[in-house]
Amino acid sequence: MKASGVATVLIMPIRIRDEIVGLLNMGSGDEKHYMATSLENISSIGLPPGMALDRSRLARALGGCMSGYSTTGR
């Protein structure tokens, strides 16, 4: 990693419920040391992408079911 200029790498899971569906990688050119509580907080960064993916999947699944409904409320 040093050859590429990256000294610290964080790899966080992207989850949908209890399933890991991807990884979010972050790197820094500076060497950093993290405490366990900091890593727990940082790991929450992967939650919003997982929720967005889950909602997208649900919307696509419902797409065929909802075709007769108006989105304007009329």
Image (tube, grey):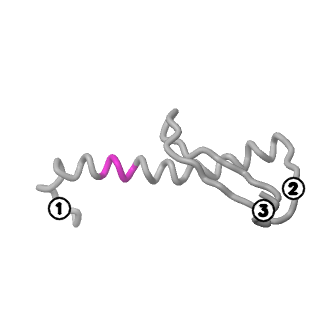
Tell me which numbered mark, 2 or 1, is placed earlier along the sequence. 2
Residue for badge 2: 32
Check disc 3 and give the amino acid type: Val
Residue for badge 3: 6
Check disc 2 and give the amino acid type: Lys
Residue for badge 1: 70
Give the alpha-carbon distance from disc 3 to disc 1, as whole Å. Answer: 50 Å
Task: Report the front residue among 34 and 74.
Answer: 34
Mark 2 secondary-structure assignment:
loop
Q: Is residue 74 above or below residue 10?
A: below
Quarter of the figure with the N terminus: bottom right
Q: Residue furthest front?
A: 3
Check disc 1 and give the amino acid type: Ser
Q: Is residue 74 magenta?
A: no
| Image point (69%, 58%), residue name | 26
| Image point (86%, 63%), residue name | 30
Which percent across, then down, holds residue 38?
80, 47
Which percent across, then down, holds residue 67?
14, 56
Foreground: disc 3 or disc 2: 3
Tell me which numbered mark, 3 or 2, is placed earlier along the sequence. 3
Give the main secondary structure of the magenta stretch: helix
Instruction: Write down the region rendered in magenta.
Output: 55-59
Q: Quadrant of residue 8?
A: bottom right
Q: Residue furthest left?
A: 68
Q: Contact, CB < 8 Å: mark 2 with mark 1?
A: no
Q: Residue furthest top?
A: 18
Give the alpha-carbon distance from disc 3 to disc 2, as whole Å. Answer: 11 Å
Q: Which mark is residue 28?
A: none
Mark 1 secondary-structure assignment:
loop
Q: Is residue 56 left or right of residue 35?
A: left
Q: Is residue 1 left or right of residue 54?
A: right
Which percent across, then down, holds residue 31?
87, 58
